[in-house]
Image: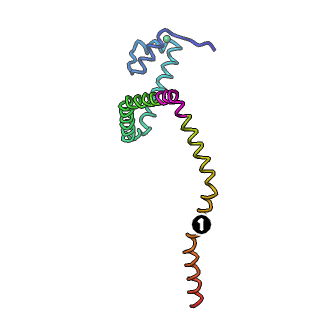
């Protein structure tokens, strides 16, 4: 099948779309096979579009409006917070840079502090058996009132 084209097809389509098909175009469509098919199909599509537009219910505009306003507020808040976010990032980067410089500049002090911390940890490890013995004593002293209360309850029930 060979497709036929006509130079007036675009003008005919525009006329049908805007509902301004004059006598000259109608006469041409009646004599031209390509424009006749275009006119037929365009009229069918237009009538179908009108049917669909009239039968399809429109969505409730309230939620759409509400969502649009909400999105507008979010966008405005994001726009307003942009300088703050930028300042936060600059401050974070500056803080990291200053921390790095301080760490490098005061590295001997940091090493001294680290060795003091490790010595303290070793001291705590050495004190661990004493701490465990004290914990056992404190735990048994804390259990003493409970044991006494249970034994009193046991004697009270036995006497009933
Ligand atoms: Zn034509």
Q: Find residue 58 and report its horizontal and vertical position in percent.
A: 41, 38
Query: Residue at position x 45%, y 26% from top?
Result: 46
Residue 72 on the magenta segment: no
Query: Residue at position x 45%, y 17% from top?
Result: 13
Q: Is residue 13 above or below residue 98?
A: above
Point out the image quarter for the C terminus: bottom right
Q: Is residue 93 above or below residue 70?
A: above
- What span is in magenta? 97-110
The residue where tag 1 is placed is 137
- Residue 132 visible from this viewpoint: yes
Q: Is residue 57 rendered to the left or right of residue 138?
A: left
Q: Is residue 115 above or below residue 159?
A: above
Q: Main secondary structure of the magenta part?
A: helix
Q: Find residue 20 and report its horizontal and vertical position in percent.
A: 38, 19
Task: Give the image quarter of residue 127.
Answer: bottom right
Q: Name the residue nearer the viewer: 46 or 154.
A: 154
Q: Secondary structure at mark 1?
A: helix
Q: Is residue 68 rendered to the left or right of residue 150?
A: left
Q: Name the residue nearer the viewer: 2 or 59.
A: 59
In the picture as drawn, the residue positioned furthest to the top comes out as: 7
Q: Name the residue nearer the viewer: 150 or 75.
A: 150
Q: Find residue 112 and report its horizontal and vertical position in percent.
A: 55, 36
Query: Residue at position x 59%, y 62% from top?
Result: 135
- Residue 48 visible from this viewpoint: no
Point out the image quarter for the N terminus: top right
């Amino acid at each position: 099948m060979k497709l036929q084209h006509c130079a007036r097809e675009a003008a005919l389509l525009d006329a049908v779309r805007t509902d301004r098909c004059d006598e000259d175009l109608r006469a041409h469509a009646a004599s031209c096979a390509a424009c006749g098919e275009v006119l037929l199909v365009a009229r069918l599509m237009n009538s179908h579009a009108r049917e669909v537009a009239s039968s399809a219910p429109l969505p409730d505009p309230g939620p759409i409006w509400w969502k649009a306003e909400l999105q507008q507020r979010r966008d405005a808040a994001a726009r307003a917070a942009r300088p703050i976010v930028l300042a936060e990032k600059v401050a974070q980067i500056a803080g990291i840079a200053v921390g790095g410089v301080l760490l490098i500049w005061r590295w001997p002090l940091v090493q001294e502090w680290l060795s003091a911390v490790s010595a303290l940890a070793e001291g705590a490890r050495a004190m661990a058996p004493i701490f465990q013995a004290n914990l056992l004593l404190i735990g048994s002293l804390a259990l003493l009132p409970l044991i006494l209360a249970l034994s009193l309850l046991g004697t009270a029930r036995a006497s009933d």
